[in-house]
Amino acid sequence: MYTQTQIKELQSLTTSLLKTADHRPLATEVIEKLRRVLRFHENRYYIQNDPLISDFEYDSLYKQLEKLESDNPALITKDSPTQRVGSSLNTSFVTVQHLVPMLSLENSYNAEDLLDWDRKAKELSKLDEVEYCVEPKFDGASISLIYENDQLVRAATRGDGVEGEEITNNIRQIRSVPLSAKFSAYGIQQIEIRGEVLMNKNSFKKYNERLAEQNLPPLANARNAASGALRMKDPKEVAKRNLEAFLYHVSYTLDDNNPKSEHPKPETHSSMLDMLWDLGFRSPKKEKKVYKGIQKVIDHCLAFETERDTLPYEIDGMVVKVNELTLQDKLSQTTHHPRWAIAFKFKARQGTSILRKVEFQVGRTGSITPVAKIDPILVGGVTISSISLFNEDVVKEKDLRIGDTVLVERAGDVIPYIVKPLAELRTGKEEEIIFPKKCPVCHDELFKPEGEAVWRCININCEAQVVERIIHFVSKDAMDIKSFGDANVRKFYEMHLLKDIPGVYQLDFDSISKLEGFGKKSIDNLKAAIENSKTQPLHRLLFGLGIRYVGETTAKTLVHSVEHLLDFRNFTEEQLQALDEVGVKVAASIYRFFHIEDNIHMLEKLEKLGVQLKNEKKQLAENDNFAGQTFLFTGTMVQLKRSDAEEMVEKNGGKVASGVSSKLNYLVVGADAGSKLEKAKKIPSISIINEEDFIKMLPI
């Protein structure tokens, strides 16, 4: 184990080595330094599961050592990090040996790396052009599965690549892993399959929401959520995380010598993925692409990077593999990685910075949010200098302090967060983060509701809340008043031209016309946008009011139950809870809002100013052909935009659901449908139709 002094020295050495990649004149000295640093970071990553640097930074150091040893082969030693598969294990689990070592992949970060790798592949294979299979590089936890006589007999983590931790009971909780698969139909008696366990973005979001309801701190990222679950002692807890498994490689097979097998064994990696898919595994069959030549591979990798945030799961790159299995065998492998595969890594989404100060911001519901101000850092192509810390409990849980070196990560939804402080690097000069007792804006005493983690300012006239509420009201997803925006709301408020939400419809345009940047065209555009907002669908108005816990989907569900927005005054909390997708907290929040006189006066004023409070869609949709029917859309539509299709359902008296449940009548499936389709197949009452079928259902 490393002492605090050693940790600081090694981290300092890491920083020094990362500053330049060319140490060739000092090869002997630098090689030993690189080995020391890499061993240290391997220990943090593999044994303690507590890294101090990002994957990109580790790979940079590894490539430096690899290049120096390649240039100076006489200096290579058996204990060098480049001469082994992996590192040691966490010994708290029973270890088992893999049938074939799980090697790492060589990493590339640009087109030049892929061109160089392709050149080597062609030289070794003596081919003018190689066929490649390209698939996403899933950002989860690596696993190895063994099936014998068509039955799952063992599952293990990657471990050190030679041995892994036996986790069969936990893997059995993952529904995308078949407990049996008919490999015998391909003449296979025993098979070892490699894959990745992950938590999709939607499951991760919902799991964190459940934690929030229990006043527990959120999980940092989906990768850690999946990796941590695999090491849980109770399989029932594993099941709660709704994990998925992608299986993408067959490392070993033992034939059963059956000459009458139903199917021939696959001869390419692509057909191997097809076989896994056909046997019930979630392989990247749909995501993979096969190309002749490296240039098409490069184009695909670069294009896919721009789409990564649209995927339902996290990926951190692409994997390029020689497609022909016999050629894979011919190319063979080094002690560290196969020569027939390479990872094209996307831009780094982690990095380290210094936490300089914490500011406390007041939200539209009065919530006090601590925001970390860090030294600007480039993560995933974006410069980050401000990061939300959520609430006081998160700050305490992470033990963050002013002056800390912190590990920053950018999630798939592009929201940055602090993973943890690097406590080992503290000097003793770091300062505790102290939460204010009074509102930073209006200076009223703050209040923390029982059972909640967030401090709140409950002064309804607090300037920060008023401004934030107006900004939310005019935003794209609410009343969608184009040309307004945050800056104009703040400017008009500061100049006393706007004081509340109804004031949006009472602006003094004569005064505004005298301001710089507001010519006739700008004012005409703003007037038109404000006027158009008066006839927005009722659910947009309800969402725009900023009622706590009422998001876009909940607002759409709620308006189905009223003819006029003020009808909610007549609902009890119990009646609200009886509505679809409305729980105790949502019901209580809606009830409170519609029983505050100031809120009712505001809505009445809006109606007098011309804002539509009647549910026009509900009136238009009475007694039509979708009445009482609930629809959900998944996948990519060809002829219709999803928003247009949902509007057609509502116009015809139907409802749009937010998820698959027994209350759903129709699931409309487009291209590349995912988990919703698989879940719907298990509920017999749901009719699964395609886009054409849906269009035929619409009235002519």
Image (tube, rainbow, N blue to C red):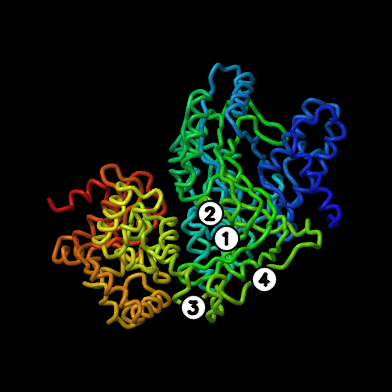
Tell me if 173 is positioned left or right of 534 in this view. right
Q: In this rendering, which labeled residue sits more in front, label 4 or label 2?
A: 4
Helix, strand or loop under label 1: strand
Which comes sooner in the sequence, label 4 or label 2?
A: 2
Residue 609: x and y, percent? 24, 68
The residue closer to the viewer here, 302 or 532, is 532
- At x 56% / y 29%, what residue is drawn? 322
Which comes sooner in the sequence, label 3 or label 2?
A: 2
Which comes sooner in the sequence, label 3 or label 4?
A: 4
**Position above or below: 439 against 506:** below
The residue under label 4 is which amino acid type?
Answer: Ile
Q: In this rendering, which labeled residue sits more in front, label 1 or label 4?
A: 4
Please identify the quadrant where the N terminus is shown. Answer: bottom right
How far apart are the two marked residues, 1 and 4, measured between alpha carbons? 16 Å
The residue under label 1 is which amino acid type?
Answer: Ser
Q: Which mark is residue 415?
A: 2
Which comes sooner in the sequence, label 2 or label 1?
A: 1
The residue under label 3 is which amino acid type?
Answer: Ile
How far apart are the two marked residues, 4 and 2, measured between alpha carbons? 24 Å
* Callouts 2 and 1 close, C-beta under 8 Å: yes
Q: Which mark is residue 388?
A: 1
Which comes sooner in the sequence, label 1 or label 3?
A: 1
Residue 343: x and y, percent? 60, 36
The residue closer to the viewer here, 182 or 272, is 272
Residue 10: x and y, percent? 82, 48
Helix, strand or loop under label 3: loop
The residue closer to the viewer here, 15 or 661, is 15
Q: In this rendering, which labeled residue sits more in front, label 3 or label 2?
A: 3
User: Which residue is under mark 3?
Assistant: 458
**Position above or below: 680 against 287:** below
The residue under label 2 is which amino acid type?
Answer: Ile
Helix, strand or loop under label 2: loop
